Image (cartoon, rainbow, N blue to C red):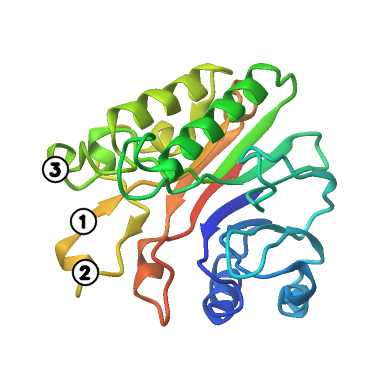
Amino acid sequence: MKIVSWNINSVRFRIAIVEQFLREVEPDILCLQETKVIDSDFPFDAFRALGYRHIVIHGQRMHHGVAILSRVPIVEDDRLDWQANREARHVGVRLPNGVRLENVYIPAGGDVPDREVNPKFGQKLDFLGRMIDWSQALDCPTILTGDFNIAPLESDVWSHKQLLDVVSHTPIEVETLARLQASNDWVDLGRHFVPAPTRLYTWWSYRAKDWAVSDRGRRLDHMWATRDVAAQASGHTVFEACRSWLKPSDHIPIMTEFDW
């Protein structure tokens, strides 16, 4: 089974490259973040035409939004409010084999890494704190994927030294994400298959005139699994070429394959 995660940065605006990706890669399940559309306006027909008939969405007008599109049955969806303000940042389902699949869009956190002067940064840390509480109580095989908006390792960013004070790679964010990982002994599947210090990025800013030449990337998108599920993973892929497609997202898709 192939499971993909992709921050698409508006599913309606980029539906053409989503369709292209699904035709070329044919994943079984696609988890999207930043769909930026209310549920009634979601492009259901485009996905159903490609065989993704099982659709669970949690939308919001112009902001946030998550979705899970599947060619296999999915049930028991939930929408956890880790932001504590009803923003559409999570949706979860159960797969046919009983594994939970949780799709999350963690807040970016604003520009200043100080909760006193930047409330958005505090909201991000509090969001992660609620995830830690959830994770500690988790008692079933689970995949946790999405845009975490944190690049934890030195080799997850183009310059560790220059980004230490930049939101997404600050020590407190890295430490908090490490606490989340330790809270249920999660396996970081990206780094399981591509160990550090190998370069591994999933995001490049739109500000760069030529993203590939400057290569100022960060690994903000992740797929984690509980140990029992991780033991069944057989490969992990990042699709850098998608960053050069027409009207691209600033994120690229990531995919893990499981022997199910």
Sequence-earlier tag: 1 or 2: 2
Residue 110 seen in this snapshot = yes
Q: Residue at x 31, y 38 (%)?
A: 113
Looking at this view, is 220 or 52 the one in front?
220
Sequence-earlier tag: 1 or 3: 3
Secondary structure found at label 2: loop
Residue 229 point in image, percent of width and height? 64, 29
Mark 3 lies on residue: 162
Q: Residue at x 41, y 69 (%)?
A: 242
Residue 197 seen in this snapshot = no
Looking at this view, is 200 or 122 the one in front?
122
Tag 1: amino acid: Arg
Instruction: Answer left or right for 181 relative to 40.
Output: left
For residue 208, which numbered disc appears in the image?
Answer: 2
Tag 2: amino acid: Ala
Mark 1 lies on residue: 216
